[in-house]
Amino acid sequence: MALLVQKYGGSSVGNLDRIHHVAGKIIQAKQQGHDVVVVVSAMYGETDRLIQLAHALTHQPDPREFDMLISTGEQVSMSLLAMALNAKQCPARSFTGPQLGIHTDSTHTKARILEVKTDIIQRELNHGRVVIVAGFQGRNEHGDITTLGRGGSDTTAVAIAAAIKAHECQIYTDVDGVYTTDPHLLPKARLLPQISFEEMLEMASLGAKVLQMRSVELASKHSMPIRVLSTFSEGQGTLVTFEDKIMDKRLVSGIAFSREEAIVSLSGIPRQIGIEGCILGKISQAHIEIDMIAQNTTAQNTIDFTFTVQRREYPKALKIVEELGKELGAISVKTNAKIAKLSLVGIGMRSHTGVATTMFQALGDAKIPIQMITTSEIKISVVVDETHLEQAVKAVHEAFELDKAHKPQLQIAIE
Amino acid sequence: MALLVQKYGGSSVGNLDRIHHVAGKIIQAKQQGHDVVVVVSAMYGETDRLIQLAHALTHQPDPREFDMLISTGEQVSMSLLAMALNAKQCPARSFTGPQLGIHTDSTHTKARILEVKTDIIQRELNHGRVVIVAGFQGRNEHGDITTLGRGGSDTTAVAIAAAIKAHECQIYTDVDGVYTTDPHLLPKARLLPQISFEEMLEMASLGAKVLQMRSVELASKHSMPIRVLSTFSEGQGTLVTFEDKIMDKRLVSGIAFSREEAIVSLSGIPRQIGIEGCILGKISQAHIEIDMIAQNTTAQNTIDFTFTVQRREYPKALKIVEELGKELGAISVKTNAKIAKLSLVGIGMRSHTGVATTMFQALGDAKIPIQMITTSEIKISVVVDETHLEQAVKAVHEAFELDKAHKPQLQIAIE
C-alpha cells in the first residue's frame, strides 16, 4: 500500500473510450490498496485547438487571457475522468490548479510552480476519494490562472508528488518506457528498467521526448522517483531515480539522436583573442539558439570554428555566417543542413575511460565519417551525415551490447 | 456617463467575427463615457457539445463534475472577448464566476446566487478596465464550481447589476427587443419600447423566450431595469421596468403563445368532494407537470375537469387519465395533442373590465372555437386548435390595435 501520483497525458485521455480505460487503471491501483492522486493533460488536440482559436482572433493574444483560455482544456478532461470513476462506483473529485492551491509566479504561459498546498489532497484522500488535478496550470498571487508551458503536466505531477511525499510519480504515456534508443529506428532497442536522473536529462534534452526536462530536474531536486509507463499495455516501465539506487549499473544507458539540426563551419580564421565571443554574439543577436560548439586551433595558427543550430534557423544563420566569414578573413565557410546528431549517454563514463574509444572504433569500423564531436561528463555527441544516422546508431548500440540485459563484468569495471 | 452591465448571449459570441463585433459595441459604450461590466455566455453550441460529451461517457454524470465540465464554455468565450478588447487597445480582464466571487448554494446544475462580491469589479473599474465575467456559474461554500441552469447568464448579469448598483442591465440577444407578439407569426407585430416586470414574467413563462424568468424576478426584486436589445442591429430595444415608470401605458402589452401543450378533459364525473386533488395527485405522482386547469360543475351535478400538460408528456398523461376516467365513472375522456395556447397579457386588465369582452368578441367574429379558458390578474389564456392559432393571434392583435403606437384615449380609460 503506497501513495501514488499518476499522470496521464493527452493521448491517454484522447477520447471517451480511453478515459474509461484510464479510469479502469486507477481503480486497479485503488484495489491494490494504494491512495491515488491523478494529474491529467487536456484531451489530445484540445490545447492546439484553443491556441489556434486565440491566434485566429488576434495576432498577439494577451498572455493573461491566453492562459485563461487554454487552461480550460485540462478542466474538461479531468471532469470527464472524475465522472467516469464515479460512474464505476469509485469516488473521485477533480480540482483545477487554482482550486487545489498550486501557486506559481506570474510569468503567463511559462509560469513556475512556487508552492503546492496539500490540505485539499489530504482531506480528499482521508475520505477515500481519488483526487484528480488539472495539469499544466496554477494561480499567481493575484488569483489569476497561469499555465506552465508545453509538457507542464509532468511538472505538476512531480511537484504534487514531492509536496505530498508520494512513493513514486508515475507518468503514463503512449510508450512503454525509456529505451536504449528509439525502437522505430532500431527494433533491437531494449527497454531500460532503470535510468538515473542525470542520464534522463541528457536523453530528454537530446530529443528522446518521453519526459519534460523541467519535471526531471524537479524530481531530481526533490528526490522523487519517476516511473514512465504505457497507458495502453502492461509492464513496469522505466524507473528514473538516483544513481545509487540503480541496481543494473551499466557503462552506458542509451543513444539519443536528433535530425532537427544543421551544422555551420568557419575554417582558417586568423587567430585573434575573443573571436569566439564575436562569432557567437552575432548569432545570438539574431535570436538563434546554438546547440553544439567545437573549436580547434590549426598548425597554421588559424581557428576552425563549428557549431550547430536548429534546422529551421539554418537559412538565417547561414546569411550571418557568410558575412562573418568575409569579415574575419576565414578561408572557407561550410554548412550542411542534412546532418544528424547522435549522443551516447551513460553515467559509467565518469569513471571508465574506454567508452569513447569503443564508440569511435565502432563508427570507424562502420566507415561512418564524423563531422563534429563534443563531450560532456556523461555523454559523447557526434554529428554525422543524416543518411548515416541509422547505421551509426546500430553500430554503437551493438558495440555496447545495449540490446542485451545487464552484464555483471561491466558493473565490476565501473566500480 | 453611467455604470452599465451588458450581457451577450451565445449567438452574440458564436464565432470570432461576432466576438470582434461585440468588442466594438463595448468600446462604443466606453467611448460614450460609460463604465462597462460584461457578462458572457458560452459560444453558441459549446455548452451542448460539452453536455453531449458527458452523456456519451456516462448515463448519469456526477453533478459536481458536470458543472466543472460545462463551466469551461464561458471561460473560453470570455477570455477570447478580453483578448479582442485588449488587441483593440481597450484594457479588459476576464474573471470566472468563482474568481469574481459569485457565491451560490450547492445545488449543482441549478444553483442559486447567494451573494456577488464587488471588490474585484470596483478595483478593475477604478483602473479603467472593462470587466468581463463568465455568466451561468459561481462557487459554493466548499469552493466547488456550480452552474445556474439554462439561461443562467441573464441571472448572473442582473445579480451583478444589482450588486454594483448599475444604471441598467442590458441583455444583448439576437432579437430587437420584446414584441407585441412573435413577428415570425404576425409580421405586423410591434416592438414594445417598455414593458413592466410583471408583464414580462407572464410573457416569458408563456413561451416568449427572450429573457430567463428567474432573471426578470431578480430584477424586479432589486428594482434593476433590464433593457433587451439586439447585438446585430442598432436601436433602443425594450426596457423592462416598474409599472409606474412606464410612460406608454396601454391596456394590453402583447400576445404570447405556445404550441408545446396538449389538453386532457374528463367530462361528467359524479361530483364528490376532493375529487380534483385525487385527479391532480395521480398526475403529479407520475412527475407530469400541469399548466392550465379549468373545472366546471354541470347542471346534472357532475364535474367537467380539463387541464393541459407538456406535449411530450401527453402519452403518459393519457394512460393515467383513461384509468382515472373508469375509476371515477366519467362519462367521457377527451384529449387533443394538436392544440395551442394563446395568452393576452397586460397590466391594464387589473383596472379595466372590457378586455375579456373585446378578446372573445374578436375570436368569435373570426369563428374560432375555444376549447378552454383560464385567467389571472394580468392575463387571459385560451386553448384553440393548433390550426387556428395564427388566425386567433391576428384577430386579437387587431382588436387591441397592438400594431399601432400608444393611443392616449386608452390611457385615459385605464386610469
Image (cartoon, coloured by chain):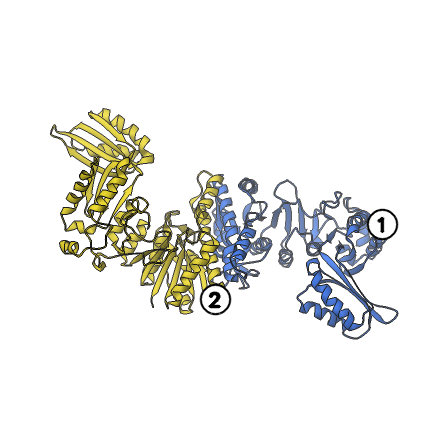
Chain colours: A yellow, B blue
Q: Mark 2 near mark 1, Cβ–Cβ under 8 Å?
A: no
Q: Residue at x 20, y 58 (%)?
A: A244
Of helix, strand and loop, which one carries label 1?
A: loop
Q: Name the residue under label 1.
A: B366
Residue A149 is tagged as none
Furthest toward the bottom, the residue is: B273
Position of residue B66 in the picture relative to residue B386 (left or right): left
Can you say which quadrant of the picture contains the C terminus of chain A? bottom left
The answer to which of B182 and B281 lies nearer the viewer is B281
Q: Which residue is drawn at 52% across and 54% down?
A: B53
Residue type at numbered disc 1: Ala
Residue A89 is tagged as 2
Q: Position of residue B34 (x, y in %)?
A: 56, 45
In this rendering, which labeled residue sits more in front, label 2 or label 1? 2
Q: In this view, does B387 lie above or below B270?
A: above
Can you say which quadrant of the picture contains the N terminus of chain A? bottom left
Q: Where is residue A246 in the image (x, y as percent from the top left)?
A: 22, 58
Q: How many marks?
A: 2
Residue type at numbered disc 2: Gln
Q: Mark 2 lies on which chain?
A: A
Residue B101 seen anywhere in this rendered image of the structure:
no
Q: Where is residue A200 in the image (x, y as percent from the top left)?
A: 27, 51
The answer to which of B328 and B226 lies nearer the viewer is B328
Of helix, strand and loop, which one carries label 2?
A: loop
Specify few, some or many for label 2: CA neighbours under 10 Å numbering under 14, 14-19, or 20 or more. few
Furthest toward the left, the residue is: A299
User: Which image quadrant for residue A265?
Assistant: top left
Q: Mark 1 lies on which chain?
A: B
